[in-house]
Structures are given as C-alpha cells and as structure tokens.
Image: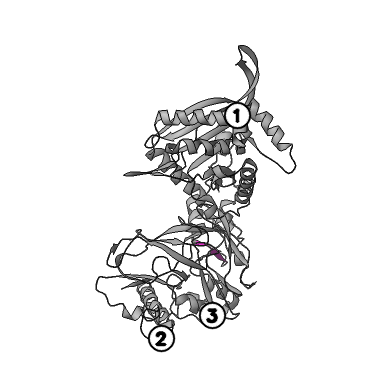
Amino acid sequence: MAEVINMPRLSDTMEEGTVAKWLKKVGDKVEEGDILAEIETDKATMEFESFHEGTLLHIGIEEGDGAPVDTLLAIIGEEGEDISGLLNGDGSSNSENKPSEDKSTAEDKAEDSVSSDEEESDDDEGDGSIPEGVEIVKMPRLSDTMEEGTVASWLKKVGDDVEEGDILAEIETDKATMEFESFYSGKLLYIGIQEGESSPVDAVLAVIGPEGTDVDAVLNGKPGGSKKKTSPDSKKEEEKSSNGSLEKTESKSEAKDVTKTVSDGERIFVSPLAKKIAEDKGIDLANVSGSGDNGRIIKKDIENYKPNSEAKPAAPSSKTESSTSAAAPVSMAIPAGEEGTEEVKNSNMRKAIAKALGNSKFTAPHFYLTIEVDMDNAKESRLQINSLPDTKVSFNDMVLKACAMALRKHPQVNTSWNGDTTKFHKHIHMGVAVAVDEGLVVPVVKHCDLLGLTQIGAAVKDLAGKARNKKISPSEMEGSTFTVSNLGMFGIQEFTSIINQPNSAILSVGAIVEKPVVKNGEIVVGSTMKLTLACDHRTVDGAVGAQFLQTLRYFVENPVTMLA
C-alpha cells in the first residue's frame, strides 16, 4: 500500500519548510533510512530520511518551493501502483472542487488498515476520524539526528487549559533539552509519555481538545494509539462498574500502565518500564510509593527507592551451638560497610556523545602536536583591551580569533573528509566546547574570522549561556569547521581532545602558568600556555599541522596583529 509522506516538522518552531534539494527522483527505489530530500526550516537546512521502502511514485513539492507542515511531500509505494485516489487533495488534480479532506480520508483509511492489522481484532475500531477541535500531539523531531525523545518534565497536567504558544513539556533530545510549545488551544486531555520515559519520534505525546472528549475513541482510531481491547465479561470490565473513577483513569493510561494485585487486594499502578526495572533489581512494588498520576509508580520511583534498613540480614547464630558449646562466645568484628552499585539510565545527550566520539576516535586516525606559547604580551594586551568601557575579552576569545586567522592561511586544516573527496570550507565556523550538566555541547560561532575580539566574546557568552540554560537551538550547534576545547580554567595544563567530526582538527587549550623561562639569555619569570592540536591524518599531514601551529603561535604571541 502506498505511503503518504507529509512535510515534516523538523524544529520546534517550524511552520513551513522549503525543499532545498531532492536526493531521489520519481521512479527511484527508496530504502528505509535513505535521504529523500534536504529541507530548509526556519533554523537550518536538514536532511530528511525515509521511514518507508518502495518506489518514489510522486513528488508533491518541487525544489525551491515552500509549503506548510503536513502538506503532501511525496508518495512511496509499489512500482505501477495507482495513487490517483491519494492525489485528489494535493492540488495537482484538475478538479478544483475536491477539498483537502480527500487526502485525509485516504490517510485515515491506511491508518485504520494498519491499526486493525496490529490489533488482530474483528471488532469495529471506528473510522479513524478525529472529532473537530481535538488534536493528537506527537513526539516532535527537535533535531536533525533525533530518533527518540525523553520527557524531562511536564509543564502542564491533565485537565489544565492550554493556549497556543504555552510550553507543554521539556523534551530531552540527543543534543539538548528543549522546551516544546503547543500549537493548539484546549484542555490537556491525555498524556501519553510520562516524565522520565522515552519514546520514538511521532509516538503519541498528548491529546488536546474540548473538555469531555472521549479520549479512548480518539486514540483507538490512530495507529500506535489504540488501546488493548477487553471482552465485556472480563474481570476488568466487572471492576469498572464497581470502581468507576479509578477504572476510568486506568483505562486512559492502559497503553502505558501495568496493574498488579497484591495479597491485600490493593491495586498497584506501574509503568511497564518501572515494572521491568523493579523486576531486574528484585524490588517488591508493594513497598514502593508512586509519584505519578493517581499514585502510579514510574521509573524515577524505582531508581530512587531505598529499602528499609530493618531488612538487613541478622548475624548467623545457633541456639543449639550455644547450648552445646562449652567454650565462651568469641566476638568477631565484622565490617559494617555494604557493597552496592547503582545503574543510571544514560540520557539521549550522553548516548549521542558516546556515539559521535566513538565514531570519530575509531574511524579518524588521530595524531597530536603540542606547542608552548609565550603569553606575556597576550596578558598585557588583554588588560589594555578590558580597560576600555563595556569591553570584556577572555584569553579563549583571543585563541578563537587566532585560530580563525591561522585557518585562513592554512585551508588544508579547514576541511572535512568525505570518502572519495575532501571538502575545503571557504567559511570559518568555530565550534566552542561547553560543559553542561548532561555532558558536552559545541555551540558554533559563525564566520569567526570576520568578527572582532569583542564580537567573538559576546557571541561565545551568549551561546554558552543558552547551552547551560538548555535554551540553545540545534541550528546554533551545527556547521562547525574547526573546534576549540579549553580546560585551562580548571588548571589543566595539557590534554588531548577527540576530533569533532566532520572537522579535521580540534585544538586543546591548557592553563596559563608562571614559570622560569629563558629570555635574551637570562632566566626570568614568564607566563606560558600549552596548545595541543589533534589532527585527522586523512586530511591533515604532520607538516601541515605543524605549520598551522607556528602561525597560531605568531598570532597569540602578538595580539596586535589580531586587532587590524
């Protein structure tokens, strides 16, 4: 069956997109994961991959054309398949009086077919239509590499009024934790992904609509949102009649919650993930207090669970041995310490960092070059610059500017390995490694060689602040051609970094230290700083890296050259 692909929402504020380039043409075979097109959003141009396999049968938006989110982008299906029924609503038909709901009807039919196949039920699940004013909110794709998201926190709860533009939740992607705002107004009727839980992009995140909407009926008509059906004579159905309000809450969360009955008849509400973790750790759910809706146990409750101290095993003893032993009891000192480990789920950012750095370290042949530079002139120049009103320049800003100028003289370092070719970047975008609570992000200062020292300082301060406050956007962390990592403020004198691919090199900046140095044949106190350049040997040879560092040394030791 043909699959309709709509213009995706590739950023949290995207309302429309422009097809910058098609990577496939009509008639081409498409595999799952193939890049279909490059789509320009309000923040960046991103690659859009296919989630379906087949033949590209139709292109709905041509290169250079823009269209709102959810507009028909393409159709993928079997070669020769009749798709005329799916095209009635995309504007390519000669009929002017066919409204766009033709396409929606076709999509709903396809979704109903998928839903019924998955449920393997003969019962009528409904026609898949959504009541007017009701919106199903999906897990958004908030970065170009995002495959799943984790709900860090909900800013709204079920029953709250939601206005268009309100922040619904904070969602953790593979790059940052970002605020996700609502594009709809109404009541928050349903939450599909609880705090701390992860789901793939396009999973049901929430339902917004008028108060009193039958959420079950809405979800049953959407693939992935249908509920497990129970027969009228099941135990759950009997309990529903005698425990109305509680069972109503449970039925709404049935796709997410697992219930367990304990010996005293009390029901325990627990998410599947929390139940699995509890089983792995041997935790009795009856002893855990839930912090979710209606006391539901969620993942963080299991992770934060501390067993009662009274459960400690007693020291081995035997009355029989005591009564038969003539010797006096022997006191043995047993250490009171307890062994213990704790497993903490890796965040999406941590997993992305591990994947990117592992890929870089194991694919790019690294080599390292270290120099020591004289910082006396740099210290004096910085004092003079910062004495000016409203001016603040750091040593890191000076290093960034020096690197940008050195890259202009050594374009071989400002490259990217591309298999059969090497990309020479004509622009210089400096990545600046910034430590955040969850790991490491690399904001990018664009066209750094064209900026003055104060402009670089202001840009770095702004980007670093956004990164630490989780307000940075994906577009502000993309496109670097060279990266600088500075641990000097922590007193680290020398270290090596892993290249931030697709860059060809990264500079590690150490602390400025005072020590005896030889100047003009005399031993005097001087200030020095070590710089280590990690290079990808596929694009940068040893001599090229050494020449780059010589030029970099000249600019850092003579700051006046960077003021011109």
Q: Amino acid at mark 2?
A: Lys
Question: Label for residue 98?
Answer: 2
In the image, 539 versus 278, the foreground residue is 539
CA distance separating discs 3 and 1: 71 Å
**Could you tell me residue 524's position as x and y percent?**
65, 15
Point out the tag, 2 or 1, that comes first from the N-terminus. 2
**Could you tell me residue 350's position as x and y percent?**
51, 47
Nearest to the eye among marks 2 and 1: give it. Answer: 1
Q: Amino acid at mark 3?
A: Asp
Could you tell me if the residues under marks 3 and 2 are in contact, i.e. CB atoms within 8 Å? no
Provide the residue span drawn in magenta: 266-271
Nearest to the eye among marks 3 and 1: give it. Answer: 1
Helix, strand or loop under label 3: loop
Q: Is residue 220 visible?
A: yes
In the image, 218 versus 540, the foreground residue is 540
Q: Residues within 10 Å of mark 2 (few under 14, many from 20)?
A: some
Q: Is residue 268 magenta?
A: yes
| Residue hosting label 1 | 558
Q: Examine the residues drawn in magenta and state their main secondary structure.
A: strand
- In the image: residue 116, left or right of residue 151: left
Question: Label for residue 496?
Answer: none
Point out the tag, 3 or 2, that comes first from the N-terminus. 2
**Could you tell me residue 170's position as x and y percent?**
59, 59
User: Residue at image x 59%, y 63%?
Assistant: 169
Helix, strand or loop under label 2: loop
Q: Amino acid at mark 1?
A: Asn
Point out the tag, 3 or 1, that comes first from the N-terminus. 3
Q: Is residue 494 visible?
A: no
